[in-house]
Amino acid sequence: MHIAFGRFADVGREVAAAAAPREAQVFQGLIEGKSNKEIALDIDISPRTVEIFRAKVMDKMAAPTLSALVRMGVTLSAA
């Protein structure tokens, strides 16, 4: 179990490090439980742009759902 978690954390960190700055900001906002609109207001972009960045992060992290992406983010931030 720890080996699998370690591999996931390593891959997740690599993907997170490769994310564009705005993607990282959106990912952080999602981890904090913020809505698309809240994230958009925080970083001064449109909610639609937040959706696009969220989709890119989900693709890079291979997250099938938003809740899976948030779980990955929480796991990575705790590791």
Image (cartoon, grey):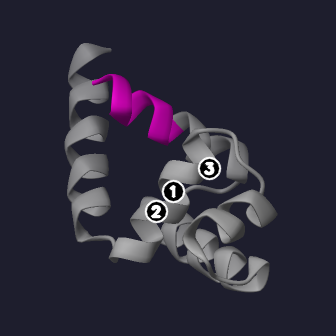
Q: Report the front residue among 42 and 63.
A: 42
Q: Secondary structure at mark 1?
A: helix
- The stretch of residues the image draws in magenta is 72-79
Q: Residue 44, labelled with which disc? A: none
Q: Amino acid at mark 3?
A: Leu
Residue 43 occupies quadrant: bottom right
Which residue is at a point 29% across and 61% down the rendered structure image? 15
Report whether residue 49 is seen: yes
Image: 59 above or below 1: below
Cβ–Cβ under 8 Å for marks 1 and 2: yes
Which residue is at a point 67% across and 85% down the rendered structure image? 49
Q: Secondary structure at mark 2?
A: helix
**Left or right: residue 14 compared with residue 36:** left
Residue 74 locus on image (x, y percent): 48, 31
Residue 69 locus on image (x, y percent): 58, 48
Which residue is at a point 56% across and 41% down the rendered structure image? 31
Bin the neighbour count of mark 1 within 10 Å (Cα to Cα): few under 14, some 14-19, many 20 and up.
many
Q: CA distance from mark 1 to mark 3?
A: 5 Å
Which quadrant is home to the N terminus?
Answer: top left
Bin the neighbour count of mark 3 within 10 Å (Cα to Cα): few under 14, some 14-19, many 20 and up.
many
**On the image, numbered disc 1 is attached to which residue?**
27
Q: Amino acid at mark 2?
A: Gln
Image: 6 above or below 54: above
Q: CA distance from mark 3 to mark 2?
A: 9 Å
Which residue is at a point 48% across and 39% down the rendered structure image? 72
Q: CA distance from mark 1 to mark 2?
A: 5 Å
Q: Residue 25, labelled with which disc? A: 2
Cβ–Cβ under 8 Å for marks 1 and 3: yes
Q: Residue 30, labelled with which disc? A: 3
Q: Amino acid at mark 1?
A: Phe
**Left or right: residue 14 compared with residue 51:** left
Residue 37 locus on image (x, y percent): 80, 65
